[in-house]
């Protein structure tokens, strides 16, 4: 069982095999059957001015909560699947989910997993990548600026709703990818390292249709330590 951090470390060191290994779930998901909405690790207004408090409140308390509630409801007759850490369900068991609820589980368990990571990889203190992450980014993209440019481009050019992610791919290498809707990188054998939510609900109150301005501001609140 390997964490996102361990997979990243292996990628920086050029070790490919960890990316295919089973994944560690969040403790909160393991205590009881069913997913729980994680607490935000900071106040709603902590990411101002990059992300406004009202957007954070609606995004966490309503959108993320809805993904959690819907996933729990969809999987209520499948306690064994529901007992798995959400990453493991998405990475290894999604084809065991009955077909008639599968797309709903992809959307809602995916939404739960994606947002759980999203809250953690933001912080009011911002900063720049360092340590293992810096080494891995420079090894793959030459520079932090080149990496940021690639992720920003993927985020702003994604048509419709979705995410742009930095992942460790199946080969154990860093890669920037676009995902539609709430499709989880875990479903494609990728381990998400950091990602930006470019659904309109993530920025519309403050930025309206100016997605590039939101992405530019988002870089100021990335929690590189996570
Ligand atoms: Mn969202």
Image: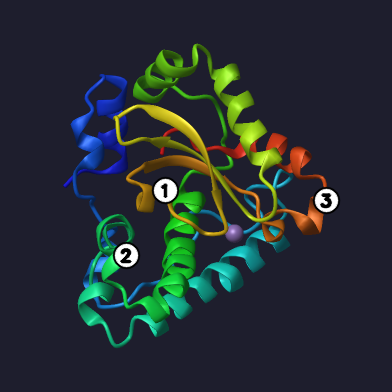
Looking at the image, the residue that sits furthest to the front is 99
Q: Earlier in the sequence, mark 3 or mark 2?
A: 2
In-front residue for pair 92/203:
92
Residue matched to label 2: 94
CA–CA distance in space, label 1 to label 3: 26 Å
- Residue drawn at (32%, 78%) of the image: 98
Considering the numbered disc 2 on the image, is that residue within a helix, a strand or a loop?
A: helix
The 10 Å Cα crowd at callout 1, few under 14, some 14 to 19, many 20 or more, is: many
- Side (left or right) of 44 relative to 17: right
Q: Earlier in the sequence, mark 1 or mark 3?
A: 1
Disc number placed over residue 121 in the picture, else none? none
Residue matched to label 3: 209
Q: Where 27 sits versus 119, above or below?
A: below
Q: Where 163 sits versus 225, above or below?
A: below
Considering the numbered disc 1 on the image, is that residue within a helix, a strand or a loop?
A: helix
Quarter of the view holding residue 174: top left
The 10 Å Cα crowd at callout 2, few under 14, some 14 to 19, many 20 or more, is: some
Residue 182 percent across, percent down from the top left:
52, 59
């Amino acid at each position: 069982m390997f964490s996102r951090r361990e997979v990243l470390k292996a990628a920086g060191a050029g070790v490919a095999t960890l990316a295919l290994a089973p994944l560690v779930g969040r403790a909160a998901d393991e205590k009881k059957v069913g997913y729980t909405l994680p607490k935000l690790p900071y106040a709603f207004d902590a990411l101002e001015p990059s992300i406004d408090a009202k957007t954070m409140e609606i995004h966490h308390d309503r959108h993320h909560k809805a993904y959690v509630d819907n996933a729990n409801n969809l999987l209520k007759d499948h306690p064994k699947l529901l007992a798995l850490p959400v990453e493991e369900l998405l990475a290894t068991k999604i084809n065991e989910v009955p077909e008639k609820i599968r797309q709903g589980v992809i959307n809602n368990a995916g939404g739960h997993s994606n947002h759980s990571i999203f809250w953690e990889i933001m912080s009011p203190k911002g900063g720049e990548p360092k340590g293992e992450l810096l080494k891995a980014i420079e090894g793959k993209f030459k520079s932090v600026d080149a990496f940021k440019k690639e992720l920003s481009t993927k985020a702003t050019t994604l048509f419709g709703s979705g995410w742009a992610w930095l992942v460790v791919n199946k080969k154990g290498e860093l890669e920037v990818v676009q995902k539609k809707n709430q499709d989880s990188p875990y479903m494609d054998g990728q381990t998400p390292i950091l990602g930006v939510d470019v659904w309109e609900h993530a920025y519309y109150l403050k930025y309206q249709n100016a997605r590039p301005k939101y992405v530019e501001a988002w870089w100021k609140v990335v929690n590189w330590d996570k």
